[in-house]
Amino acid sequence: MVADGADPLLRFPILMTDRLVLREITAADAAFWLLNFSASEVVELTAWEAPRDLEAARAEIEQFCTLPWREGTGIRWGITLRGSNEPIGTLGYHGWVQGRDRRARMGYDLLAEHRGMGIMTEAMGVALAYGFKTMTLHRVEVLVDPRNVPSIRLAERLGFHLDAHLRQSTRFRDTFQDDLVFSLLAREWRAAAEAKH
Ligand SMILES: CC(C)(COP(=O)(O)OP(=O)(O)OC[C@H]1O[C@@H](n2cnc3c(N)ncnc32)[C@H](O)[C@@H]1OP(=O)(O)O)[C@@H](O)C(=O)NCCC(=O)NCCS
């Protein structure tokens, strides 16, 4: 459900589910961002080094949240539990190609104490509905480290198909790591959504 009434592509969309509110991330969330992206397993599984400090966290928020939304190349939500404004994770689209191709890639992460309760399944459900309906995406892609069993299970549970195993395609520190490419197409998402009703 989209809470904002105005044109959803002009105003940052707040999305709601039974347990969650997905809202914009701002510089005021820098302490959360630093904590979230400093967890060793998040660093390892996303192949992205932790921000050094609060200033670096604010710069990443600008780079990965504010600018992409302003430029129409991505959208990243902070996940909060209803009744609290404090983010417990993030998810969103990057590499959003509008116009003819209509595709984007997704990323997601949660603080460790909130995992294993179906939170990301719920958040991804509403974010995918927004992606296919409002952003009119044709294809959504997720890149997953083959060691990341929870993320693979999540993608499969949401109906994503395994397209490819890319060998040594991501350089992290002194190694090249493999990536699995999962995709979900608009018609597949629509068929699954209709089957639920
Ligand atoms: C990947 C990640 C986002 C998954 O988040 P999550 O909220 O724990 O994922 P889920 O919603 O699938 O919940 C996980 C488990 O809770 C179970 N669960 C409990 N209650 C549930 C409910 N109401 N609905 C759905 N699942 C529920 C699921 O069955 C699932 O177990 P399974 O994987 O053994 O089947 C999380 O592990 C994470 O942040 N990892 C580190 C960062 C990362 O790897 N990011 C992805 C990079 S590609």
Image (spheres, rainbow, N blue to C red):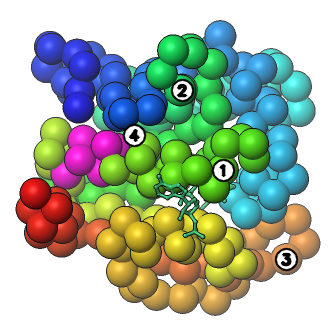
Residue that numbered label 3 is attached to:
175
Residue that numbered label 1 is attached to:
115
- Quarter of the image holding residue 90? top right
Residue type, label 3: Thr
Residue span colored magenta: 126-132
3D distance between C-alphas at marks 2 and 1: 13 Å
Labelled disc at residue 74 = 4
Q: Which residue: 87% across, 53% down?
A: 40
Q: Position of residue 81 (x, y in %)?
A: 53, 26
Residue type, label 2: Thr
Asked if labels 4 and 1 touch by Cβ distance under 8 angstroms, the answer is no
Q: Which residue: 85% across, 77% down?
A: 175
Residue type, label 4: Gly
Q: Nearer the viewer, residue 114 or 4?
A: 114
**Which mark is first along the chain, 2 or 3?**
2
Q: Is residue 128 above or below residue 85?
A: below
3D distance between C-alphas at marks 3 and 2: 35 Å
**Which mark is first along the chain, 1 or 2?**
2
Labelled disc at residue 80 = 2
Residue type, label 1: Arg
